[in-house]
């Protein structure tokens, strides 16, 4: 039986060149999965492409952890370009 995803946290670093997602245990901070995607800077690639790359990176982190894609306890996102008007 697997650990419920509510016991995990997700960190995302999204920029104009790539996106990295780390899935970690909430209590220990131990990283259990890492995923990568392409650029997710909304100003550089547009909203739909940015969302697709965020989804790819997060999905890959869950896959690397051997877990189904599901909600987590907390997610923290650092996204370049998100605070600028298009």
Image (cartoon, rainbow, N blue to C red):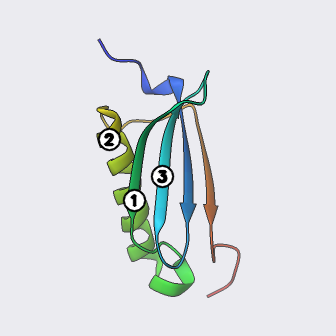
Q: Quadrant of the C terminus?
A: bottom right
Q: Residue at x 54, y 76 (%)?
A: 41
Of residues 73 and 8, the one drawn nearer to the viewer in this rendering: 8
Q: Position of residue 32 (x, y in %)?
A: 44, 34
The vertical placement of 72 against 81, above or below, is above
- Position of residue 64 in the picture relative to residue 10 (left or right): left
Q: Mark 3 and mark 1 in contact? Answer it, CB < 8 Å.
A: yes
Mark 3 Cα-neighbour bin, 10 Å: few <14, some 14–19, many ≥20: many
For disc 2, the marked residue is 64
Residue found at the very far right of the displayed protein:
83
Query: Circle 2 — which element?
Result: helix
For disc 3, the marked residue is 21
* Alpha-carbon span between mark 2 and mark 3: 11 Å
* Alpha-carbon span between mark 3 and mark 1: 6 Å
For disc 1, the marked residue is 36
Q: Position of residue 58 (x, y in %)?
A: 41, 50
Of residues 78 and 30, the one drawn nearer to the viewer in this rendering: 30
Q: Position of residue 17 (x, y in %)?
A: 48, 77
């Amino acid at each position: 039986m697997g650990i419920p995803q509510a016991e995990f946290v997700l960190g995302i670093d999204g920029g104009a060149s790539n996106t990295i997602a780390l899935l970690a245990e909430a209590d220990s901070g131990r990283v259990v999965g890492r995923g990568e995607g392409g650029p997710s800077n909304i100003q550089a690639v547009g909203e739909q492409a940015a969302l697709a790359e965020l989804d790819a990176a997060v999905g890959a982190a869950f896959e690397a952890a051997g877990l189904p894609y599901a909600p987590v306890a907390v997610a923290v996102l650092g996204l370049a370009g998100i605070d600028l008007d298009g």
